[in-house]
Image: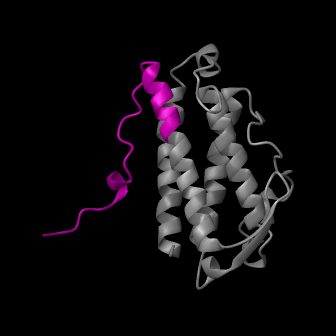
Amino acid sequence: MVSNEYARRMAAYNRWMNEKVYAAAAQLPASELAAERGAFFGSVLGTLNHLMVADLIWLKRFSALPDFHATLAPLRGLAAPTALDAMPYPVFAQLRERRQWLDGVIENWADSLGGDDLQQVLEYSNTRGQRFRKRMDGVAMHFFNHQTHHRGQVTTLLSQAGIDVGETDLRALIADEPD
C-alpha cells in the first residue's frame, strides 16, 4: 500500500508546502490571520492550528509503537491534544516556530522507516474514545493526505485574502527523468 519512500517523499512535501504556506500567511496582519472566513476551522490561524493538533495527535499515537519510540522521543513531554479545534498557538510566530520543529520530527520519523515498519498494526483511540486497529501504511497515507487537504483550504483562504502561495503540486518535487 504505502512504502517507506512514499512517507519520505510526503514528509519532504509537507515541509516544503508548510514553508510556502507560512511565508504567504506571514504577509497578513494578525487580525486577518484570525479573521473568521467561513472555513471548517474558521480562520487561517484556526486551520493551521488544526493541522498542528492533528499531526501531534497522530504522531503521539505512532510513538506508542516500539519501532518509533526513538525517532518520536521529542514528543514525549507533550500532551496529546484532546480537541481537533484547539488553538494551542494563537500567536502566528509561535505557531510557525513549532510547525518548523514538528516538520523536522516528521522528516526524521520518515527517514528512519525501514523494513516492515509500515506493516505494523497501530491500536489507538480517537478523541471520542472509539478504539481502532489499523495498519500503519494506511494510517500514514491518511496522515499525509490530511495535511494536504487542510493546506488546500488554507491556500484558498489566502487566495481570497489576495495572497498567492505559488506552486503547490507535489509534481514540483519529482525529479525529471533523462531522455
Question: Which residue is depicted at the point 38% across and 53% down?
Answer: 170
Q: In the image, residue 41 lies at what x, y percent? A: 65, 32
Question: Which residue is depicted at the point 68% across and 80% down?
Answer: 120
Q: In the image, residue 4 lies at what x, y percent? A: 53, 74
In the current view of this chain or complex, which residue is farthest to the bottom? 115
Q: Quadrant of residue 67?
A: bottom right
Question: Which residue is depicted at the point 69% across and 42% down?
Answer: 98
Q: Is residue 94 above or below residue 9?
A: above
Q: Is residue 19 above or below residue 70?
A: above
Q: Is residue 69 above or below residue 152?
A: below
Instruction: Tell me, yes or no, whether the highlighted magenta stretch contains residue 37.
Output: no
Range of residues picked out in magenta: 152-179
In front of the other: 47 or 106 = 47
Q: In the image, residue 153 lies at what x, y percent? A: 51, 36
Question: Which residue is depicted at the point 72% across and 26% down?
Answer: 91
> Does residue 58 appear to the left or right of 178 in the view shown?
right
Name the quarter where the C terminus is drawn. bottom left
